[in-house]
Amino acid sequence: MKNIILTFLFLLTLTSNAQRSVEGTSIIRQNYIYQKEFSFERNWKTIGKFKSGAGESLEVFPIIFSTPDGKIKLHGLQINAFIKPVGAVGAIGFDPSGIKLGGSTPLTKISNFIDKEDLNNMIIFIKRDIIPNLKTKLKKESKEFVFKTKEIFFSFLIDEKDLRITFHLSGYNSLGDNSGGESEFWTESQVDEMPDFLKAIEEAYSKMN
């Protein structure tokens, strides 16, 4: 009986991980990989930033990908996450500005893209499912709202009185190499920042051609 229970829990874990897997590449990344010549404009005026209690951080800013002939011009967002390597315990390395925070293990940088169309749907998701539930409390139950793009699994969890925002990210490093597998960033302390984040990405979307 014990073996049956352990097998069930193992299969349940596999199912849960499969549901949260991130598959595919954004249109921006596809062009980034296959185009021979292009320009990549990054607006370093960050429109969103979250931090976790573990010293990790996630920042969001607008980008424009275009080819010299002007035939391709893609607007979207880039998400940079600075996350502890798998297995690191209490190690905090460098924040996005390069300032050493302490510890000996550097944070791993993960970069993902959100296409313009996905951004519009993400705005709808936040306005419909997150903002109205920021004060929601449940008793002996939980509820999770999920939004997926080709490179990101974004979720909002209500677990009785606790709220959590989680980003499951494809493991693309700063060079575009997807050798890092998938990574996760989550925060409970900054869920209240979502209204300001929504306002910022709505403004960014309104400026996209």
Image (spheres, helix red, strand yellow):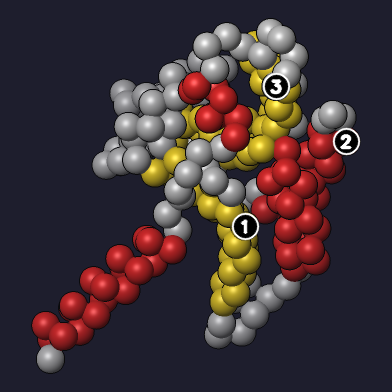
- The answer to whether residue 14 is above or below residue 101 is below
Task: Check disc 2 and give the amino acid type.
Answer: Ser
Residue 121: x %, y % from top left: 73, 52
Marks 3 and 2 sit apart, C-alpha to C-alpha, by: 19 Å
Q: Which residue bears the numbered disc 1?
A: 147
Q: Is residue 53 left or right of residue 74?
A: left
Task: Check disc 3 and give the amino acid type.
Answer: Ile
**Mark closest to the chain's N terminus, 3 or 2:** 3
Q: Which residue bears the numbered disc 2?
A: 206
Q: Residues within 10 Å of mark 1 (few under 14, many from 20)?
A: some
Residue 122: x %, y % from top left: 71, 50
Front in this rendered view, residue 188 or 13? 13
**Mark closest to the chain's N terminus, 3 or 1:** 3
**Which image quarter is the C terminus in?**
top right
Q: Which residue bears the numbered disc 3?
A: 72
Q: Is residue 32 left or right of residue 106?
A: right
Q: Is residue 142 left or right of residue 90?
A: right
Marks 3 and 1 sit apart, C-alpha to C-alpha, by: 27 Å
The residue depicted at 60 percent of the width and 74 percent of the height is: 143
Q: Is residue 3 left or right of residue 151?
A: left
The residue depicted at 63 percent of the width and 66 percent of the height is: 145
The residue depicted at 31 percent of the width and 68 percent of the height is: 13
